[in-house]
Amino acid sequence: MVTATRRFEFSAAHRYWRDDWSTEENERVFGRCTRPYGHGHNYTLDVTITGQLDPRTGMILNMRELKAIVSEVLEEFDHKHLNEDTPYFRALIPTTENIVRVLWGLIAPRLPTGVRLARLRLYETNDLWAEYDGADEATFARAYSFSAAHRLHAPALTDAENQALYGPCNNPNGHGHNYTVEVSVAGPIDAESGMVIAMPDLDATVRAVLDRLDYHHLDREIPAFAERPSTGEHIIVYLWDELAPRLEGRLRHLKLWETGRNMFEYTGPATVVTGRSERTDIHHGTHDYP
Ligand code: NI
């Protein structure tokens, strides 16, 4: 299946609040997003389409045509207050999950015959996005950071072999990284909160796992790395094993940046994918998305 993606941007204000919930409940679930006048974001929307390649043009759809269709939809959102200025969020909380689903309902029927919306991914910030593909479930992802020291050293190898294999990463006293983990969860969008998972619950769950590593030496202080080298591959599997049971079946994907250039992905037992990126715009714990 060939897909084509075009990126769009819009800026909008929003507020999370349910009149039928107490102030305490609103604040517990929505936090700062309950503030009365709202706040705003520069949203980034990746629109991915698929369909038959037109044999004459070699395209699924002319990108200029896609741009015109989606831009017309986004006019209603750009430089607006989503709750106040659009009709879609009177009863619906304008969470990233709900916004992306509303956009799906507006964009999908406008595409010409033979062109199909494959997925929409909406970034509220670089560290937070939701994805929807028309099914019952949505995906929500948020990135978190921790900083830790480690040393790459395999007990099964001799000192000389370790030195040859890991080079400077085998330094006996260790070195350290600002690690970033992107946690993707999937499930139905809760009708009341508008979320796949209440964000304070996700934050607390992930932080509890990461705080055990944050500002520690992985090999010397974390039993899981006493006998196996603290490679990105082993760390991401460790994180999966810690997070999956706590997230009760909703964990779908983990992405771990050891540095801006070394990135690891894991979707659960049986598959480990590693990637070495040539991107250079990722430094010191901040990161970007392709
Ligand atoms: Ni917001």
Image (cartoon, helix red, strand yellow):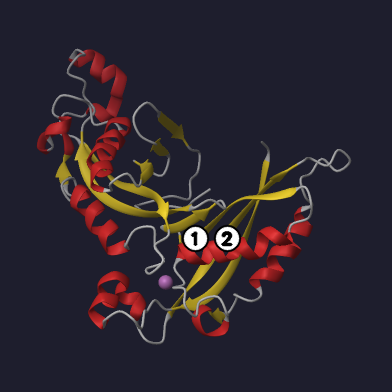
Three-letter code for the amino acid on which mark 2 is drawn: Leu
Q: Quadrant of residue 67?
A: bottom right
Residue 113 visible (yes or no)? yes
Image quarter for ligand 1 equals bottom left
Please report the residue visible at 39 percent of the width from the left and 49 percent of the height from the top: 184
Q: Relative to residue 42, is residue 62 drawn left or right?
A: right
Please report the residue visible at 22 percent of the width from the left and 38 percent of the height from the top: 175
Q: Which residue is mark 2?
A: 45
Q: Secondary structure at mark 1?
A: strand
Q: Which residue is mark 1?
A: 123
Q: How many marks?
A: 2
- Mark 2 to mark 1: distance in Å? 6 Å
Disc with the residue nearer the chain's start (2 vs 1): 2
Give the image location of residue 94, x and y in percent: 47, 72
| Picture disc at residue 234 | none
Placement of 229 over or under 47, stated as above or below: above
Please report the residue visible at 34 percent of the width from the left and 79 percent of the height from the top: 34
Residue 286 visible (yes or no)? no
Give the image location of residue 101, x and y in percent: 54, 62
Placement of 219 over or under 111, stated as above or below: above
Tag 2 near tag 1, CB within 8 Å:
yes
Give the image location of residue 251, x and y in percent: 35, 45
Q: Secondary structure at mark 2?
A: strand
Q: Is mark 1 within 8 Å of ligand 1?
A: no
Q: Relative to residue 263, is residue 59 drawn left or right?
A: right
Q: Relative to residue 10, is residue 190 drawn left or right?
A: left
Please report the residue visible at 53 percent of the width from the left and 48 percent of the height from the top: 290
Q: Nearer the viewer, residue 49 or 24?
A: 24
